[in-house]
Image (cartoon, rainbow, N blue to C red):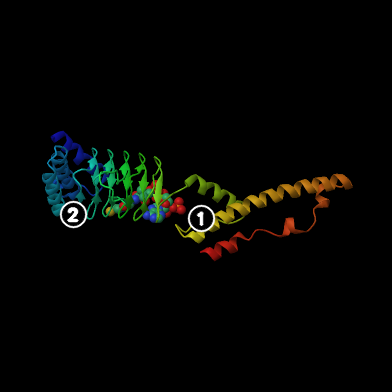
Amino acid sequence: MFSRLREDIACIRERDPAARSNWEVLTCYPGLHAVLWHRLAHAFWVRGWRWAGRFSSHLGRWLTGIEIHPGATIGRRVFIDHGMGVVIGETAEVGDDCTIYQGVTLGGTSLTKGAKRHPTLGRGVIVSAGAKVLGGFTVGDGARVGSNAVLMQAVPAGATAVGIPARIVQKSGDAAREQAAAKMGFSAYGVTQGDDPVAQAMKGLIDNASGHEHQIALLWQAIEKLSARSRELPVADCVPDDACTTERFDAEELNRLVK
Ligand SMILES: CC(C)(COP(=O)(O)OP(=O)(O)OC[C@H]1O[C@@H](n2cnc3c(N)ncnc32)[C@H](O)[C@@H]1OP(=O)(O)O)[C@@H](O)C(=O)NCCC(=O)NCCS
């Protein structure tokens, strides 16, 4: 029991730069107190002493502002930072080394008794302040949920989900888009506006337009080569001052409109 308490305190000192001593953590961290109350409540719950489980969970909530249903499964070294307003539902499972900030709900959307209604967090998941994770799906190991996100679908291991409704941040996709946009002389990140659907639509259009522009350039090259060959002229003399060289996709203007 004491070794478990020691690791609870150690994990808080590792993850909270504001924690100055073990004594401070033991006496002033409601997240630690809530986890300790939950251990007692859960022990009652799994022995079938349901009222005792509910009542000790209720006392823990009263003292800490953190509500953990006694049926929830909480792993080792789980750190609930600040904690006020955290709600963890009956069928939720929280893996080892998870960090949960204030105002987080691990809730359900179904009212079916006995069913798995609440999420499962893998190991080392971070759920930022105010995020709502709703449903019986899994958030993979090491995944992160941004503050105030409303997450309603599974998240793969290591991914970051942000926004309402939460979407996975596509870091590699964004990098490719940025590269394509840079070739056209502007920054695609200029049109990244979080979850704004217009901005999302613009991203799609820009990707599409840059793909078309590339294909048109290839076609023009082929036409120029054919034309030079048939007239036996150097390729440079055959390049007309026409659409292929004078008209450009006005991405900067689109960027300004979307801002
Ligand atoms: C959520 C978190 C874990 C994400 O970390 P990460 O995986 O390193 O991701 P990044 O911070 O690089 O953010 C990735 C993208 O998501 C965006 N993002 C991050 N959090 C967001 C949020 N809550 N809402 C909307 N977008 C968000 C970033 O702006 C960035 O967008 P970009 O790629 O277009 O620039 C991190 O922001 C965090 O530390 N959260 C905890 C904060 C918290 O609750 N603190 C409470 C202290 S009391």
Is residue 97 left or right of 38 when viewed as pictured? Answer: right
| Residue found at the far bottom of this picture | 257
Location of mark 2 (residue): 65
Q: Position of residue 106 (x, y in %)?
A: 28, 49
User: Residue at the spot x=17%, y=50% of the render?
Assistant: 30
Type of the residue with mark 1: Tyr
Residue type at numbered disc 2: Gly
Q: Earlier in the sequence, mark 2 or mark 1?
A: 2
Residue 97: quadrant of the picture = top left
Q: Residue at x 63, y 50 (%)?
A: 211
| Mark 2 C-beta closer than 8 Å to ligand 1 | no
| Above or below, comparing residue 196 to residue 87 in the picture | below
Q: Which residue is mark 1?
A: 189
The reply to whether the residue tagged 1 has its Cβ within 8 angstroms of ligand 1 is yes
Query: Does 165 sit above or below residue 176?
Result: below
Q: Residue at x 63, y 61 (%)?
A: 250
